[in-house]
Image (cartoon, grey):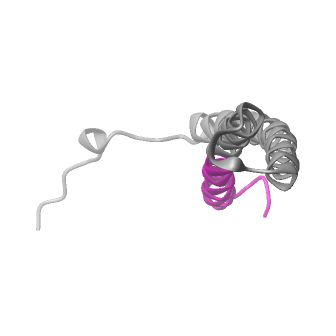
Amino acid sequence: MTEDDPAGEISDIEARIEALAEIAERCRKYILASKIAIGGGATLLLVTILGFFGFGQTAALASIALVLGGIVSLGSNVSTLRQTDEAISEAEARRSALIGSIDLRVVADAPLKLV
């Protein structure tokens, strides 16, 4: 890839933006799953503490593990999503700059050729 070939570089940047968008979407799914895990774990812990359905210590430990695992996963994926969004913004800015540097001409300005 050279600076003399902005079209190729633009194509590479667009491919990178698509890959980053897939990563961002995957992070969003994990964030949702993490929030569900936190909510489910908290609910299970509350049910266990209040003594509904006769759940024992195992359920309490599992609910605590679910909440903690959800919190860790949430934090990690939120951080990754922020970094990915920043990378997408930078790539889009670079792509816009490259498009702006190309000497484009309007089709209406092209000379008419009669055949």
Q: Image height check: is 72 above or below 15?
A: above
Where is residue 35 drawn, in percent x and y?
A: 67, 38
* Residue 9 image-quadrant placement: bottom right
The residue lying at 73 percent from left, 42 percent from top is 41
Q: Is 59 positioned to the left or the right of 94 in the image?
A: right
Judge whether residue 23 is colored magenta.
yes
Where is residue 83 drawn, in percent x and y?
A: 81, 38
- Closest to the observer: 79 or 31? 31
Q: Image height check: is 97 above or below 27?
A: above
Q: Main secondary structure of the magenta part?
A: helix
- Closest to the observer: 44 or 21? 44
The residue lying at 80 percent from left, 59 percent from top is 2
Q: Is 24 positioned to the left or the right of 104 in the image?
A: right
User: Which quarter of the figure is the N terminus placed in?
Assistant: bottom right
User: Which quarter of the figure is the C terminus placed in?
Assistant: bottom left
- Closest to the observer: 60 or 103? 60
Q: Is 57 positioned to the left or the right of 52 in the image?
A: right
- Closest to the observer: 72 or 90? 72
Q: Image height check: is 8 above or below 55?
A: below
In the rendered picture of this protein, how many numbered marks are placed on residues? 0
**Residue at the bottom extreme of this rendering:** 115
**Residue at the left extreme of this rendering:** 115
Where is residue 67 drawn, in percent x and y?
A: 80, 41
Which residues fall within the magenta stretch? Answer: 1-30
The residue lying at 73 percent from left, 55 percent from top is 4
Where is residue 6 drawn, in percent x and y?
A: 66, 52
Judge whether residue 14 is colored magenta.
yes
The residue lying at 60 percent from left, 35 percent from top is 96
